[in-house]
Image (cartoon, grey):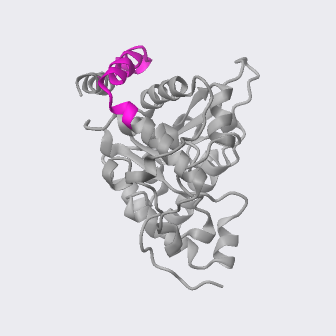
Amino acid sequence: MSEIKEFLDPPFRWDLTHRRRLGSLLEGERASRYAGFEQDILTCCSRVLAFAGNSELVFIGRSPESVFDQLSGLLYDSSWFERLILLHFSMRFCSEASIRQELPGAIPALRAYFESLSLDPHGLIQRPRPVALIDLVDSGDTFGRLIRFLANWSDEENCHWEAVRAKIRLIGLTMRTQTSPKTWRWQQHAKWIHLLGTSAVKNVSLPPELWLYIGNTQPKVSRSYTPEDWGELQASKPSYLSEQLKALRLAHFLFERGRKAELRQSFARMLVREPAMNEAWFRKLALEIRQT
């Protein structure tokens, strides 16, 4: 049984905005990817912004890393850059009750991590804007565990859940399929969805190649942040495994690519085609990207 731990440092991930600090780590082979990956990621970024509804953007776990990295470059020097958060979180195949029993220090450490990002129940209520939680989705299990975690926390803190959930949106990155009245939609089958309501959910459909790549085969910059790692000092230290360094080089490539004026002009033209251009906040964002 581990002891109760306080939150020390956040889970480690290389900061792509400081090229000099990365130094020779960027020398060498990048993670391989399929033809068309860069364009697919760019299109995904456009749809995510359009569906976000003028929210903060919180990317859950490791699957959407490349979307986060590409948007970090595209929005760098803009008023939206500070809205991007990469939340390290993995709770698959375990319940909160089992974690409390087997790892009594884990939940307090995870809560402290969320508090540091103002993603705790009180922090969410006090945010000036909603947060859009973004993740690759199959069944919605990660979303469900995260929402239940927040709902249970709210109950323990006597924090009004209605006020908390009013600040939460979900954007699922789903695999594109043929649409029909019988199309399977994950949110219609999620047993926990009553905690938010289906109106809080929007889905961005991805080409199968992109969904399978970022979900199954892509090397990741970050290590998985599972309950065994919550609050552990080792999780706050860098790792130099070969596959992670290849992933770091691809992440930096996407970030720097997003900073290029030519790509930003192209991306701004993509935004103009989104239905969200009817909204003043979205038109302002598109103009800002075009001018940076």
Residue sticking out furthest to the left: 291
- Residue at the spot x=66%, y=71% of the render? 99
Q: Residue 65, image x and y in percent?
A: 51, 44
- Residue at the spot x=69%, y=64% of the render? 95
Asked whether the viewer can see residue 18, the reply is: no
Name the foreground residue: 268 vs 121.
268
178 on left or right of 124? right
Question: Which image quadrant: the N terminus?
Answer: bottom right
Asked whether the viewer can see residue 48, the reply is: yes
Q: Residue 91, image x and y in percent?
A: 64, 59
- Residue at the spot x=56%, y=78% of the render? 105
**What span is in magenta?**
256-280
Judged by its main secondary structure, the magenta piece is helix
Whether residue 181 is situated above or below residue 108 in the rendered picture = above
Marks counted in the figure total: 0
- Residue at the spot x=58%, y=69% of the render? 229
187 on left or right of 153? right
Q: Residue 246, image x and y in percent?
A: 55, 46
Residue sticking out furthest to the right: 182
Query: Residue 117: which quarter of the image?
Result: bottom left
Whether residue 50 is situated above or below residue 249 in the rendered picture = above
